[in-house]
Amino acid sequence: DAKTTQPPSMDCAEGRAANLPCNHSTISGNEYVYWYRQIHSQGPQYIIHGLKNNETNEMASLIITEDRKSSTLILPHATLRDTAVYYCIVRVAGGYSTLTFGKGTMLLVSP
Amino acid sequence: NAGVTQTPKFQVLKTGQSMTLQCAQDMNHNSMYWYRQDPGMGLRLIYYSASEGTTDKGEVPNGYNVSRLNKREFSLRLESAAPSQTSVYFCASTLGAANNEQFFGPGTRLTVL
């Protein structure tokens, strides 16, 4: 699986959009971009995934650049409960593969 | 649905002691996983079971054994605990091998003295 690079930490004001970047310049054509988050002391939680088109669900939006070398996770209206470590993961979909977690980005949402 | 449950939540062992961490899921998932997370680090895969009756090594399997008891349960055993195994252990499951979303349990915090 391709390696990802994320900033170690970011800050965001409550109610504002949080934009979390991820670099995956060595991504292959059959690899998806996944995002998980881990709130302190809890197990990770799936957020969203995508291949090349932008995706949106009830939690977040995922914007993938046209060359697929980077992506941005957007939390449109961050709340204090969104404070967590966010992991960007690249993996092959279809067939069997496991998740490889890096260190992620610690997002701190402040009042 | 309880989702993925893990027992115990906390455990303190002495070096050389053995113990089994239990994991169960009630979502009828086929695949189950064991991860460990050390302070300030991401999760690392220890073992996984793609389906009932099969188990495979992950990134850091040394010092551990697993048993897929049935479709619901996947246990992790430390035969002779070492201080290097002090960590938080997470169990997870997915519906199928290619499924998008892994569901995680709340974790077991293990300290080996």
Image (cartoon, coloured by chain):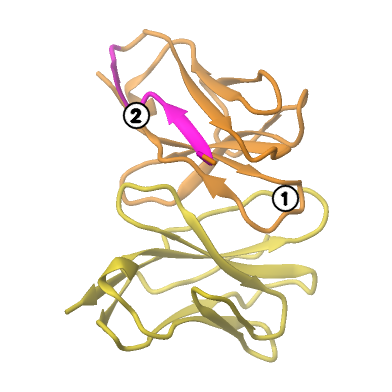
What shade does chain B have? orange
Provide the secondary structure element on which disc 2 rests.
loop
Identify the image quadrant of residue B106: top left
Q: Chain of mark 1?
A: A
| Tag 1 and tag 2, C-beta contact below 8 Å | no
Query: Residue extending furthest left?
Result: A111
Mark 1 is surrounded, within 10 Å at the Cα level, by few (under 14), some (14 to 19) or many (20 or more) other residues, namely some
Say which of B72 and B89 sits in front: B72
In the image, which lettered chain appears yellow?
A
**Percent of width and height locating residue B49:** 70, 32
Identify the image quadrant of residue B72: top right
Provide the secondary structure element on which disc 1 rests.
loop
Depicted B14 relative to depicted A34: above or below: above
- Residue A97 tag number: 1
Mark 2 is surrounded, within 10 Å at the Cα level, by few (under 14), some (14 to 19) or many (20 or more) other residues, namely some
Depicted A85 relative to depicted B63: above or below: below
